[in-house]
């Protein structure tokens, strides 16, 4: 459902966010949950902003197309992507994660 209560086909992704890390990085998938580390503390939404910037960079989509729909004040988050297919998200993230370990 979107903000108006209408069904939407935009894909969602569950994320486990680890704030106060030594670097901003996408760690990998733990089952269906993407683990992401960010440098900033979870104060005034800074960790959430870093998460969106990092995902935007690696998925090559505008920051405005990434929305945290649940978990604004939690480490467990649900992210909605507007204008990108679910298969593309997983494929791009797996390419990035795989490239780190090649």
Image (spheres, rainbow, N blue to C red):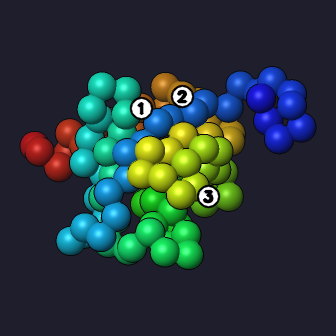
* For residue 40, side relative to residue 65 (left or right): left
In the image, residue 59 above or below residue 90: below
Q: Is residue 18 visible?
A: yes
Task: Identify the residue at horizontal 37%, vertical 27% (top origin).
Answer: 32
Q: Earlier in the sequence, mark 1 or mark 3?
A: 3
Label drawn at residue 80: none
The residue that label 3 is drawn on is: 62
Q: Is residue 59 visible?
A: no
Pointers 1 and 3 in contact (CB under 8 A)?
no
Which element is circle 1 on?
A: helix
Q: Quick one: label 2, few (<14), some, or many (20+) residues within 10 Å?
A: some
Which element is circle 3 on?
A: loop
Pointers 2 and 1 in contact (CB under 8 A)?
yes
Task: Identify the residue at horizontal 42%, vertical 51% (top origin).
Answer: 75
Residue 3 horizontal/vertical position (percent)? 83, 41
Q: Viewer-proximal residue, 81 or 68?
A: 68
Q: How many marks?
A: 3
* For residue 2, side relative to residue 39 (left or right): right
Q: CA distance from mark 2 to mark 1?
A: 7 Å
Residue, far left? 102
Residue 35 horizontal/vertical position (percent)? 32, 45
Q: Quick one: label 1, few (<14), some, or many (20+) residues within 10 Å?
A: some
Quadrant for the N terminus, please: top right
* For residue 33, side relative to residue 74 (left or right): left
Q: CA distance from mark 3 to mark 2?
A: 16 Å
The residue that label 2 is drawn on is: 86
Task: Identify the residue at horizontal 25%, vertical 67% (top origin).
Answer: 21
Task: Identify the residue at horizontal 68%, vertical 39% (top origin).
Answer: 83
Label drawn at residue 90: 1
Q: Viewer-proximal residue, 48 or 94?
A: 48
């Amino acid at each position: 459902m979107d903000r108006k209560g209408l069904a939407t086909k935009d894909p969602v992704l569950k994320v486990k966010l680890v704030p106060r890390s030594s670097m901003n990085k996408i760690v990998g998938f733990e089952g269906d949950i993407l683990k992401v580390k960010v440098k900033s503390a979870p104060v005034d939404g800074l960790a959430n902003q870093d998460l969106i910037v990092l995902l935007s960079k690696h998925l090559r989509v505008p920051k405005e197309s990434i929305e945290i729909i649940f978990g604004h004040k939690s480490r467990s988050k649900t992210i909605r992507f507007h204008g990108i297919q679910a298969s593309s998200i997983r494929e791009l993230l797996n390419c990035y994660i795989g490239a780190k370990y090649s």
